[in-house]
Amino acid sequence: MTGAALVEGDAYTPYELITQVEGDALVMMASDFVAFALATPELRIFARRFLRSLGVQVSYTALANAKFEIRQRLARWLVMVHDRVPGRSFQLTHDYLAIMLGVRRSSVTDALHLLEGETLIRSTRMSIEIRDRQGLITVAGEAYGAPEVEYERLMALPLATGSPAFPSVRIAAAN
């Protein structure tokens, strides 16, 4: 969800949003969102809860970057992507992963090889397949879990839509 800060009266975003993997999205004009939020208390509550969960996620990302080794951070990041996309495979380059983790590309390649050697993933050119989600979660350790539990508590929605352990959640646009 982007634009949730509109509910707090902030129409300015100091950054550009870029999708990381292919997927579906709904687009709405900011003015329409504000009007709908003003008329719908449930949407205001939902947006505020989303902002809270986002703050928790960002805090844990900072913690992971400061405390954990690249292999753990990569495992965490791959599970987080898997939480948000359907299926077990997604398209990502080593360069992009390096940017997301704030490390050199060669470090990402080395960490991917380690995870692949443990049969947790299959990595090919621009594609990663999750083979053992629970194994990745184990590798991620304390770097993964708390923000996800908080998201599910606040949003009352399962986060791990890409995992077979959770039902798929689809929100359809009204016609």
Image (spheres, grey):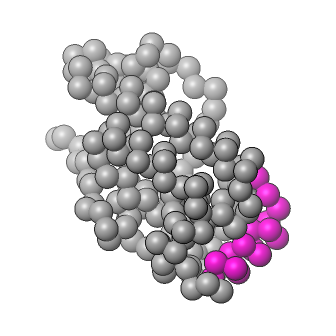
Q: Left of 174 or right of it: where is 46?
A: right
Question: How many numbered marks are there?
Answer: 0
Nearer to us in this view, 4 or 165:
165
Residue 25 vertical placement versus 154 (above, below): below
Q: At 34% across and 41% down in the image, what residue appears?
A: 153
Image quarter for residue 110? bottom right
Task: Tell me which segment is drawn in magenta.
Answer: 102-116
Q: Position of residue 93 (x, y in %)?
A: 66, 68
Q: Quadrant of the C terminus?
A: top left
Nearer to us in this view, 9 or 121:
121
Q: At 68% across and 75% down in the image, what residue appears?
A: 112
Residue 7 vertical placement versus 74 (above, below): above
Image quarter for residue 156? top left
Let me know if residue 113 is in the magenta part.
yes
Residue that extends furthest to the left in the rendered view of this protein: 175
Q: Left of 29 or right of it: where is 71?
A: right
Let me know if residue 133 is in the magenta part.
no
Q: Position of residue 82 (x, y in %)?
A: 46, 64
Q: Quadrant of the N terminus?
A: top left
Residue 79 vertical placement versus 123 (above, below): above
Is the stretch drawn in magenta largely helix, strand or loop? helix
Q: Position of residue 17 (x, y in %)?
A: 57, 40
Nearer to us in this view, 11 or 100:
100
